[in-house]
Amino acid sequence: MLGLYEGLRKAESALLTQARIGRIGLAKFLYGRSVPGFTTATCRCGVGQETPRHMALYCTHEADKRHYLHVGKTRTYTQMVGTNEGAKHFARWMMHSGRLKQFALAKRLLYSSE
């Protein structure tokens, strides 16, 4: 299991862990915790609940950016978050999505030179 996180920076590892257990700053989790401002678990695309899986596979707002996750081949969500190669791409992709405000500073510090 530790090999899954090899090569990831601390913030990327934290994001991956949160995504894998479903406790991450997206609408489904925040609505379930009665966070003010979250009146529904539905994604802004209206297709399903806002979860990491939904974003990676189904969200129409992410469709044009999703190719980064596949790296030339089709990937399942389990491959994205359960393999080291997939996890690296997934964590960075999620960080760049802009939906996770708690990672805004980490994104700026980690990727400012990219």
Image (cartoon, rainbow, N blue to C red):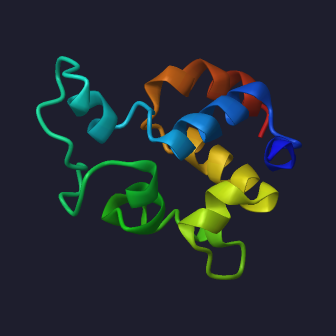
Q: In the orientation shown, which residue stands out farthest toward the left?
A: 39
Residue at image position (49%, 21%) is 102
Q: Quadrant of residue 111?
A: top right
Tell me what residue is drawn at x 65 percent, y 45 percent. 91
- Residue plotted at (18% across, 17% down): 36
Give percent across and percent down for residue 42. Answer: 19, 48
- Choose between 72 and 6: the one closer to the eye: 6
In this rendering, would 16 be left or right of 27?
right
Viewer-side residue, 73 vs 112? 73
**Left/right of residue 30 with respect to residue 11 in the rendered view:** left
Quadrant location, the C terminus: top right
Residue 30 at x, y percent in the picture = 29, 29
Q: Is residue 86 visible?
A: yes
| Residue at 71% over, 80% down | 72
- Residue 68 visible, this angle: no
Question: Residue 97 location in percent, x, y?
Answer: 50, 45
Measured along the vertical axis of the image, is residue 111 above or below residue 48? above
Q: Is residue 21 above or below residue 81?
A: above
- Percent position of residue 73, x then y: 68, 82
Tell which of 42 and 108 is nearer to you: 42
Point out the residue furthest to the front here. 1
The total number of labels drawn is 0
Q: Residue furthest bottom?
A: 73
Work out whether residue 32 or residue 42 is closer to the camera in this orientation and state it: 32
